[in-house]
Image (cartoon, rainbow, N blue to C red):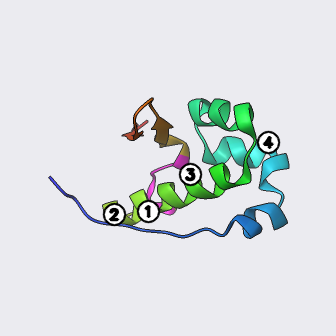
Amino acid sequence: MVIGIGYDIVEHAITEKLNWSTDLELLKGIFSEEELNLYFKNKVTRFIAGRFAGKEAVLKSLGTGMEDGLDLTCINILQTSSRETLHIIRG
């Protein structure tokens, strides 16, 4: 079943300019513990930008936003050996 389709783009340069990679509190507010573990293994800026864009796309596809009660840390975009998987956890 398709609920909706969402897409989002985040430029890598913006995340670099805003120093997202050095702001641990900001990262904890956006990413789950599992996602942070993946990020800290490689520390690649495109990981932050890509995962954030993916989370925004999920919100758009659900027709909701962060202000509507779905926290970004509840959306996990994790990678298995063969593909990326998405988990939404409602708290």
Residue 86 in picture, x, y percent from top left = 39, 42
Q: Which amino acid does label 2 sit on?
A: Ser
Q: Give the range drawn in magenta.
A: 67-72
Residue 43 position in % (x across, y down): 75, 41
- Asked whether, in this view, residue 44 is left or right of residue 70, the answer is right
- Where does label 1 land, which residue? 57
Q: Which of marks 4 and 2 is nearer the N terminus?
A: 4
Of 34 and 11, which appears nearest the observer? Answer: 11
Q: Which residue is drawn at 73% across and 53% down?
A: 45
Which residue does the image show at 64% across and 58% down from the upper left?
Answer: 49
**Number of other residues with Cα within 10 Å of mark 4, as a class: few under 14, some 14 to 19, many 20 or more:** few
Q: How far apart are marks 4 and 3 (CA)?
A: 16 Å
Q: Which of marks 4 and 3 is nearer the N terminus?
A: 4
Q: Is residue 83 above or below residue 67?
A: above
- Secondary structure under tag 2 reads helix
| Residue ranking furthest to the front | 82
**Magenta residue check for 37:** no
- Residue behind mark 3: 51
Q: Viewed as shown, does residue 16 lie left or right of 29?
A: right
Indicate the secondary structure of the residue bearing disc 3: helix
The 10 Å Cα crowd at callout 1, few under 14, some 14 to 19, many 20 or more, is some
- What label sits on residue 61 in the rendered view? 2
Q: Residue at x 68, y 38 (%)?
A: 39
Q: Which amino acid does label 3 sit on?
A: Arg
**SS for dot 1:** helix
Q: Which of marks 1 and 4 is nearer the N terminus?
A: 4
* Pair 4/3: label in front: 3
Q: What residue type is labelled 4?
A: Leu
Of tags 3 and 2, which is closer to the observer?
3
